[in-house]
Each structure stands twice: as structure tokens, then as C-alpha cells.
Image: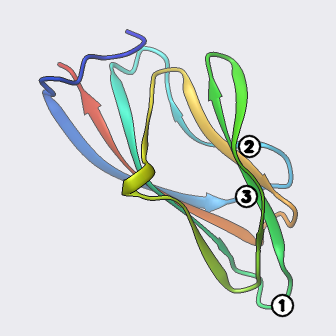
Amino acid sequence: MANPNIVNVARIFGNTVAGTFAASNTAFLTNPASSGSVYKINTINVANIDGAANADFSLILRLAGANTIFVETVALPADSVVIAVDKANGFYLNENCTIGGSASAAGDVTYVISFEQLYAT
């Protein structure tokens, strides 16, 4: 089921994932093939936890086997947070799709993704 019908949702689960960016493109969140669900991405917050140095980050969607950059090379000052996605510009992540990214300083940039997992049955 590649794109579940969510008109009459049977179940909704709230989820949050967090982690640290690597220097190369790495998947943070994957909606597996045949999960029977769609993820409603509500927020993605990105923080630079280095107290002295700036860093850049990019966020990448992998849809149908192809990468699409949706936030590219954003400068993130030391000890700051950027709200890359919020409720006003949230989106759906279908089955067999991922959200990932990379940062100029591996280990210095973190992410928190809040999403709802919607099941049609």
C-alpha cells in the first residue's frame, strides 16, 4: 500500500525522533515500504550544540528512490535553533520514503522531528 487513504483514519500515534547529523547524507526517519501508514510531519527543529563554531545543514527527502533537497546549506550560528518545518508548512511522508540530511560539522548539529503516524486500518 504505497499511499494509504487517511480520510477515515483508524489509528493515530504521536511520535518524536531525535539525533545528530553526520557529515554525509544520512536518513533520520524512514517510513518503511508496506507500513500501512503515512507520517504527518509536524515539526523539524535543528540545533547547533557547539558553543563556539557555526555550522551548515541540509535536509533531504528521498521520494520514490530519488533525493530532493528541501532545505539547503542553511547557516546555523553556534548555540542556536532553526525551525525548519512547523505546523504551517508540514507535509506527509508516504511509505518507502525518508527524511535525512547532512551537516558541515558532524556531531555538532542535532534534529528533533515530531510526527503523527496515521493508519487507514
Across and down, in percent, residue 90 comes to 42, 47
Q: Quadrant of the N terminus?
A: top left
Q: Is residue 49 shown above or below 116?
A: below
Q: Is residue 33 shown above or below 59?
A: above
Among the 4 quarters of the image, the one containing residue 11: top left
Neighbours of disc 3 within 10 Å: few (<14), some (14-19), many (20+): many
Q: Is residue 87 left or right of residue 84?
A: left
Neighbours of disc 1 within 10 Å: few (<14), some (14-19), many (20+): few
Q: Which residue is mark 2?
A: 26
Tags 1 and 3 touching, CB below 8 Å: no
Q: Amino acid at mark 2?
A: Thr
Q: Which comes sooner in the sequence, label 3 or label 2?
A: 3
What is the number of callouts on the image?
3
Q: Residue at x 17, y 23 (%)?
A: 7
Q: Which comes sooner in the sequence, label 1 or label 3?
A: 3
- Cα separation, mark 3 vs mark 2, equals 7 Å
Q: Amino acid at mark 1?
A: Ala
Q: Which residue is mark 3?
A: 21
Q: Nearer the viewer, residue 47 or 26?
A: 47
- Cα separation, mark 1 vs mark 3, equals 17 Å
Q: Which residue is mark 1?
A: 52
Q: Nearer the viewer, residue 101 or 106?
A: 101
Q: Is residue 84 left or right of residue 48?
A: left
Task: Say which element carries label 3.
Answer: loop
Among the 4 quarters of the image, the one containing residue 88: bottom left
Across and down, in percent, residue 67 comes to 73, 29
Across and down, in percent, residue 104 comes to 87, 62
Tags 3 and 2 touching, CB below 8 Å: yes
Q: Quadrant of the C terminus?
A: top left
